[in-house]
Image: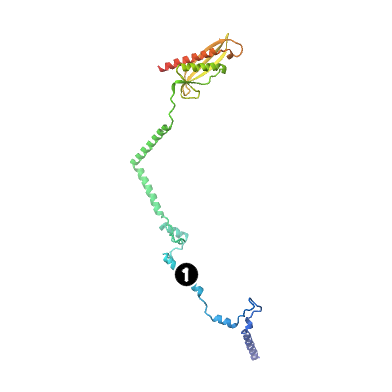
């Protein structure tokens, strides 16, 4: 029985091998692509397997690598080998020692990597500057020269400021200006002002406007009118001031007019106001002459 079984198994294997060598085993169950194309046979498979493999792709890649290597050699770039691992600590140490980072890749434009000045050079320049400052501080002659220059600069600044200020206007001692009169109405002030101007011009004085600060003298007047028994009295006070507003002299007096009921100023005729102006300018001129002597 064992022999028969072995024989049957051998015969079955032979039939199976024979079936594998037929073209039907390599024919797909359905058509693929063009219906007119011939199916691949066992013979075609064996022929393609026996053919040598092409090395075109490998040779092309090898030629490209050789060309790139030759190009780098022509440019003078040689890959370097470094002892460190290229970590941040190694790069920092290289920068401190030589001012150059050996781990940096070559620039794409072919230029050299920019170098950084070493810390030792910077420290040396700072030390030299501090040493020079210390020597200047220890040198008494240099200190004296510096103090002299500072003193001259301080003296020149006030002189320049004083020169830049405009000169003050010189006061004309032969001029006068009148400030607004206080206490009298317009009808009483009008004849007074006209007579004051006439008297001043007769004395050779120039009348300035009330806002002109170049006048030599300023006259500021106060007037008052009131009933005084059977008459009306008009009192006047004039302060003579300088340009700064300081009082130099005072002129005062009084005049009278007949009594009338009602407003006292309405009872004062223009002649009384003109007389007050004449007396005021006469006393002012006398005082001015006394100051000249």
- 45 versus 245 height, above or below: below
Q: Residue furthest top?
A: 230
- 195 versus 132 height, above or below: above
Disc tally is 1
Residue at 40 percent across and 52 percent down: it is 123
Q: Residue furthest left?
A: 141
Quadrant in the picture for residue 70: bottom left
- Disc 1 secondary structure class: helix
Residue at 36 percent across and 46 percent down: it is 132
Crowding at label 1, few (<14), some or many (≥20) Cα neighbours within 10 Å? few
Q: Nearer the viewer, residue 89 or 148?
A: 148
Q: Where does the image place residue 197, in percent across and percent down from the top left?
A: 49, 18
Horizontal side of residue 128 vs 36, given as left or right? left
Horizontal side of residue 36 vs 85, given as left or right? right
Q: Nearer the viewer, residue 273 or 135?
A: 273
Q: Give the residue at mark 1.
A: 65
Instruction: Name the colour scheme.
Output: rainbow
- Is residue 185 visible in the rendered image? The answer is no
- 38 versus 215 height, above or below: below
Q: Quadrant of the N terminus?
A: bottom right
Q: Quadrant of the C terminus?
A: top left
Q: Where does the image place residue 104, in percent across and percent down from the top left?
A: 46, 61
Q: Where does the image place residue 86, in percent across and percent down from the top left?
A: 46, 62
Q: Where does the image place residue 206, in percent across and percent down from the top left?
A: 46, 20
- Is residue 63 visible in the rendered image? The answer is yes
């Amino acid at each position: 029985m064992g022999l028969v079984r072995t024989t049957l198994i051998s015969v079955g294997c032979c039939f199976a091998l024979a079936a594998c060598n037929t073209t039907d085993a390599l024919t797909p169950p359905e058509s693929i692509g063009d219906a007119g194309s011939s199916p691949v046979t066992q013979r075609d498979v064996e022929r393609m397997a026996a053919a040598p493999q092409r090395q075109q792709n490998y040779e092309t890649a090898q030629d490209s690598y050789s060309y790139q290597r030759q190009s780098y050699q022509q440019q003078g770039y040689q890959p370097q080998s470094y002892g460190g691992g290229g970590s941040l600590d190694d790069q920092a140490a290289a920068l401190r020692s030589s001012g150059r980072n050996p781990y940096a890749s070559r620039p794409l434009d072919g230029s050299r990597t920019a170098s950084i000045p070493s810390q030792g050079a910077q420290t040396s320049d700072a030390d030299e500057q501090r040493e020079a400052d210390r020597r200047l501080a220890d040198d008494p002659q240099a200190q004296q020269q510096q103090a002299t220059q500072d003193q001259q600069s301080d003296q020149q600044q006030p002189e320049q400021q004083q020169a830049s200020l405009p000169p003050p206007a010189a006061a004309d001692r032969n001029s006068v200006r009148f400030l607004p009169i206080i206490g009298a109405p317009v009808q009483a002030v009008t004849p007074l002002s006209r007579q004051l101007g006439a008297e001043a011009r007769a004395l050779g004085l120039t009348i300035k406007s009330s806002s002109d600060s170049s006048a030599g003298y300023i006259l500021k007047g106060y007037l008052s009118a009131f009933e005084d028994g059977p008459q009306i009295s008009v009192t006047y006070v004039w302060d003579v001031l300088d340009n700064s507003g300081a009082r130099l002299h005072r002129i005062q007096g009084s005049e009278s007019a007949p009594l009338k009921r009602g407003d006292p100023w309405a009872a004062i005729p223009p002649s009384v106001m003109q007389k007050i102006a004449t007396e005021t300018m006469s006393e002012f001129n006398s005082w001015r002459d006394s100051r000249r002597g």
